[in-house]
Image (spheres, rainbow, N blue to C red):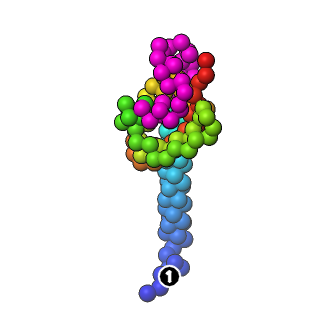
Amino acid sequence: MRFNFNKFSNREQILIFGLIILIFISALIFVISWLNTKNQSLEKENQNIVSRLNYIESIPSSVSSNRNLYSDNISILVNSTSKEKNIQIDRTQPLNDNSMMVWVNEVNFIDLYNWMILMGEQGGEIEKMNVRKSKKDKVNAQISVLLKTN
């Protein structure tokens, strides 16, 4: 069955073209609105992460009385603090005597954040980190931890 557009009058053809254009514009507005909403939520999430990292950096070195507790072993610091905060470490790689790379997958961001604060309080310092959202409330992280020396 073929559709014969010419059987409609000029007025009906204009109405059909108008409806098609209206549907197209409506779809375009919907897509732009959806992209704008997505962009705003990503910007807000980025601002939250930056503010949390700024907070971690602002913790003074004199906050913790047990800063020297793990003064000779970065591995002990990472493992004991991760167990305390129930963080499952997937992989570690020593970088040198005082630093290591840590991979954590499928962890709640708040738990990861609290773990980094605890490491900071006990003599660790986050040199670099890469955090990516994986599932609804979960993130994957790659963190370079340095043992502070007094």
In the rendering, at what x and y percent does residue 86 appear? 36, 36
Who is closer to the viewer here, 150 or 47? Answer: 150
- Neighbor class of circle 1 (other Cα within 10 Å; few <14, some 14-19, many 20+) is few
Q: Is residue 53 visible?
A: no
Q: Is residue 117 found left or right of 130 in the rendered image?
A: left
108 lies above or below 59: below
Q: What secondary structure characterizes most of the magenta part? A: helix
Residue occupying image coordinates x 43% and y 87%: 1
148 lies above or below 97: above
Residue occupying image coordinates x 48% and y 30%: 77
Residue 143: name its quadrant. Answer: top right
In the rendering, at what x and y percent does residue 52 appear? 51, 27
In the rendering, at what x and y percent does residue 4 appear? 50, 82
Residue interval drawn in magenta: 51-80
Question: Which amino acid, by three-letter code, is at mark 1?
Answer: Asn
Residue 11 inside the magenta-drawn segment: no
Question: How many numbered marks are there?
Answer: 1
Residue occupying image coordinates x 57% and y 38%: 100
Who is closer to the viewer here, 119 or 26? Answer: 119
Residue lying at the far bottom of the rendered structure:
1
- Give the labeled residue for mark 1: 4
